[in-house]
Image: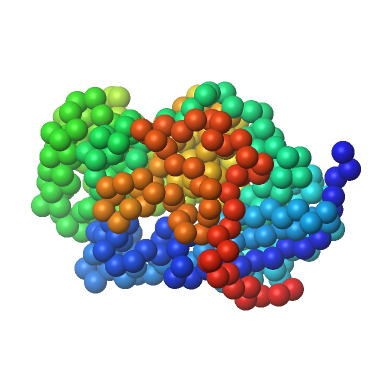
Amino acid sequence: MSMPTIRQVRAFTLRGGGGDYHDQADGHWIDGQIATPMSRWPEYRITRKSFGIDVLGTLVVEIEASDGTVGFGVTTAGEIGAFIVEKHLARFVEGKSVDQIETIWEQMYGATLFYGRKGVVLNAISGVDLALWDLLAKVRKEPVHALLGGPVRDELVFYATGVRPDLAREMGFVGGKMPLVHGPAEGDEGLRANLGQLAAMRARVGPDFWLMFDCWMSLDLDYATKLAAGAREHGLKWLEECLPPDDYWGYAALRQAVPKGMMVTTGEHEATRWGFRMLLEMGCADILQPDVGWCGGMTELVKISAMADAKGVLVVPHGSSVYSYHFVVTRHNSPFAEFLMMAPAADKVVPMFTPLLLDEPVPVGGRLKASALDAPGFGVRLNPDCKLHRPHLH
């Protein structure tokens, strides 16, 4: 088939209208108390919005081909990301063949090294990359997972992230990951409260249901080691992202210190094959958890997964809905997936990107058939009722 070229790249923001899980209404569990790197200051301890977790907002990247086909990707980068896409990255995309994804990625990354490497720049690159995969799959009239090699299993199995693992168990999920509430600044009293929360939840869900703690970069090695030791008797499956992302040495030490059978996981806020190479070479984690919207997109996630597979390390992407589902279903070292409970009380299953995306599949009974991902591209549409703003024309 004749491959079209790329006519135009467009970057939009969406604020206050849904689609960004960091930007939730007051009272949502996601913005309830969770230990963070800012928890040592009491004024920033209770909610993540207090220190600005919602300041970026959603970035939507659209890429239109010469035949009129449009692909899009969604990430968190807001107006800063839109500026980077329109004013810098577009020059490496427009005019190229739709199937030149590898070349486009390398040029975007190389051109932003002097001010990028991680963070919002990689978020923006990820948004462009996801839009390119969506576009190429639509041009070929195939789902993205077909471009990745096709499904290796008939269905996806999920654990749920939220404040009510007991309800997640009733909904059929294989496990529940809870936000850790108290950080080191709250001392031994906070540590006892964390372990009490875990003990109470274990009593509710029984001995066989997975329970995990999401520590969101908030701990130090000493506290994380004490938490792991205390959590052993309650069957904690893993401690997630305990330390700052750049503390590879701390993660390596923690993995050696946790009780036998307990896993250490991280990677949500890591980026590119080079960042994950450090985690792998230093033996930092049992499971890597890249976010496909932040780590460099699908192009980079494939490389990260291959490195991990060679080391015998699992890759279970952070959230990301369809953007990770299409990947997980094609990888043997991604045996299950994360589902982020987006209902304010974590008491029902709703699509992650509501209301921004239409046709977004959700697990039923904690599972999702691979056949639910068979529509072209990533299989979702932008909701026309969500008003997008294009702040930076190039």
Above or below: residue 20 compared with residue 145: below
Q: Residue furthest right?
A: 2
Compare residues 318 and 358 and report the one nearer the observer. Answer: 358
Q: Is residue 212 visible?
A: no
Above or below: residue 385 compared with residue 69: below
Q: Residue at x 61, y 48 (%)?
A: 297
Compare residues 275 and 336 and report the one nearer the observer. Answer: 336
Q: Residue at x 45, y 56 (%)?
A: 354
Position of 216 with respect to 385 (left or right) is: left
Q: Colour scheme of this structure image?
A: rainbow
Q: Residue at x 65, y 66 (%)?
A: 11
Estimate the x, y position of residue 305 in percent, counting from the top left: 57, 34
Q: Is residue 340 visible?
A: yes
Q: Residue at x 65, y 55 (%)?
A: 72
Position of 207 with respect to 338 (left or right) is: left
Q: Quadrant of residue 203?
A: top left
Compare residues 260 and 100 and report the one nearer the observer. Answer: 100
Q: Quadrant of the N terminus?
A: top right
Estimate the x, y position of residue 327 in percent, counting from the top left: 57, 36
Tally of marks: 0
Above or below: residue 130 compared with residue 44: above
Estimate the x, y position of residue 24 in percent, counting from the top left: 37, 63
Q: Quadrant of residue 362?
A: top left
Q: Quadrant of the C terminus?
A: bottom right
Estimate the x, y position of residue 157 in percent, counting from the top left: 42, 30
Compare residues 280 and 338 and report the one nearer the observer. Answer: 338
